[in-house]
Image: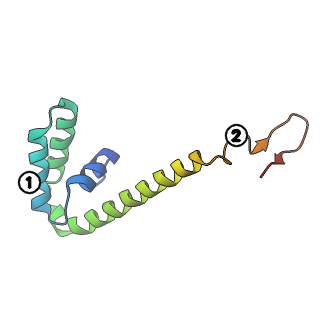
Amino acid sequence: MKLTFEEKKLLYTYGCADLELTRKRLYGVAGLTVDPDQNKLVLDFCRKLEDETLADWYDQMFYFVRSEMEHYTMMQKMSRDIEEDEDWGPTIFDESEGEELIDDV
């Protein structure tokens, strides 16, 4: 089963290792969602989770997606830290025409 990034975010936020509880939670979220596009996304994902063959390996998929999303969050934080670093930016390398690159670090 292929999951979109939005579906992975839903699973990370509302999912658990028990497939039945995850389905219940997502149907509850769909019932509370006001935005029609988001509601469609949640309901489509719920229907995806209704697949009978998923029951055997759902828990492994859940932990894999959870790990992937945690690493994604850490990479976002690291990216923000790099962008906020005063020494990092376009002025690190002076790209003057006709000269070699100069490393100001």
Amino acid at the residue labelled 2 = Pro
Query: Percent x, y for residue 33?
Result: 15, 37
In the picture shown, does residue 7 fall above or below 66? above
Give me the residue at 36% from left, 57% from top: 69
SS state under label 2 = loop
Q: Is residue 66 visible?
A: yes
Relative horizontal placement of residue 38, taking residue 8 as reference (left or right):
left
Is residue 50 toward the left or the right of residue 86 in the image?
A: left
Residue 97 location, quadrant: top right
Q: Determine the image quadrant of residue 65.
A: bottom left
Q: Which residue appears at 22% of the width and 68% of the height?
A: 59
Image location (x, y in percent) of residue 78 = 52, 54
Task: Mark 1 or mark 2: name the one nearer the start of the chain.
Answer: 1
Q: Residue furthest front?
A: 86
Q: Is residue 92 left or right of residue 81?
A: right
Give the left or right position of residue 21, taking residue 79 as reference: left
The residue singled out by tag 2 in the image is 90
Q: Which mark is residue 91?
A: none
Q: Nearer the viewer, residue 47 or 32?
A: 32
**Distance between the Cα atoms at labels 1 and 2?**
49 Å
Residue at mark 1: 24
Give coordinates of residue 99: x percent, y percent.
90, 40
Quadrant location of the N terminus?
bottom left
User: Which quarter of the picture shows residue 24?
Assistant: bottom left
Q: What amino acid is found at the position of numbered circle 1 in the picture?
A: Lys
